[in-house]
Amino acid sequence: MRNFTAVSLFAILILTASVSAVDAQVAPSGIVDSSLRMEFLFGTQALSYSDAASASFSSVVFRADFNPRVPLLAGTVEVSPFPSISGRFAGAVSIMEKSGSVYRANGFSSTTTIPTFFAGRWDVEPDVGYWELAGLYHLWNGGGYRFSCTAGYRREVWRYHGESVGNIDGGTFRDDMTSQIPFLGLQTSMFFPLWKARFEVLGSAFMNKKVASRLQYGSSFIDYRGTINQGGLLEFQMEGNVSVTQNLWCGLHAKYTYQELTGDVTADTSIGQSSLDLHSADNYITLG
């Protein structure tokens, strides 16, 4: 991941140096730049629970695979009170959620107390939202280019709820995942009379994710919860806009996000208690 980040930062520097400055303009201070977008998020999320007594993740005792496909209503407001400083507020919330499915697989062994009958396919409805505050310090702002350092905080919430289908019809579950993400990044922006563009890379080695879930089937249940914080975030954003009128722009926003975290959780079940190692991997794209 470190090599990937270094290559990405180098690519942004090369891009900054290679774009022509013809008809360029300096991003003015004291302005508010806002946008409202319809986006579509798609990708994968996986939660793997392993026996804490094992030295590796090879003894996976429970796994859940999500494939979210979610439309979002997103917005961004950026304020530039000074030529060298900007502030940004961004957020998104899911709308028109559609039911999907998640497959839970068991690798039951005698060392765990996870009931095997929770394996199978479950119908789910996702709910996702986030908000973000960030500050930008502009290392260079002239000739149509702006090269900035970014620091900020993001809070992200994923919720899944649904019912089991097939051989375990009648079960219910709810998964709640809340991430606290302080981040750093680099941004390159270009401003021209008829178009503008932005490229940004963000990373975090200090994020954490609080996970809580309950699966219920008759009198049997699994209730696990904990906070995982070993890992991090890597994200790439790009945006391009063309001028429609003096105050109206139309464009495309794209974002790729990768998160990977591990940690310990406690599982209370109808037949006992277990300590499990949780591995979480999120890999998704947002377009709008």
Image: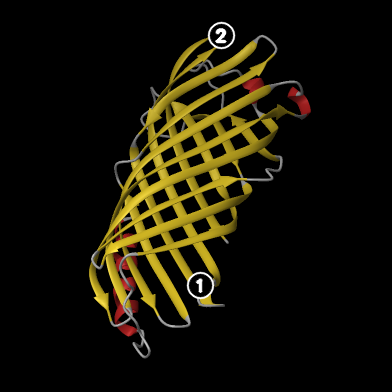
The number of numbered discs placed on residues in the rendered structure image is 2
| Element type where label 2 sits in the image | loop
| Element type where label 1 sits in the image | loop
Q: Position of residue 210 (x, y in %)?
A: 42, 30
Which residue is tagged 1?
247
- Residue at x-position 69% and y-position 45%: 96
Kindly indicate whether the residue at mark 2 contacts the one at mark 1 (C-beta within 8 angstroms). no
257 shown above or below 144 = above
- Residue at x-position 46% and y-position 56%: 76
Q: Give the residue type at disc 2.
A: Ile
Marks 1/2: CA–CA distance: 63 Å
Horizontal side of 153 relative to 254 (left or right) equals left
259 shown above or below 265 = below
Quick one: 13 or 248, which is closer to the camera? 248
Between discs 1 and 2, the one toward the N terminus? 1
| Quadrant in the picture for the N terminus | bottom left
| Quadrant in the picture for the C terminus | bottom right
Q: Residues within 10 Å of mark 2 (few under 14, many from 20)?
A: few
Quick one: 66 or 69, which is closer to the camera? 69
Q: Give the residue type at disc 1.
A: Asn
Q: Residues within 10 Å of mark 1 (few under 14, many from 20)?
A: few
Residue farthest along the bottom direction in this orientation: 22
Q: Position of residue 25 (x, y in %)?
A: 34, 82
Q: Nearer the viewer, mark 1 or mark 2?
A: 1
231 shown above or below 19 = above
Horizontal side of 71 relative to 168 (left or right) equals left
Which residue is tagged 2?
271
- Residue at x-position 67% and y-position 43%: 97
Quick one: 106 or 179, which is closer to the camera? 179
Find residue 40 and report its image quarter.
bottom right
Q: Position of residue 60 (x, y in %)?
A: 50, 31
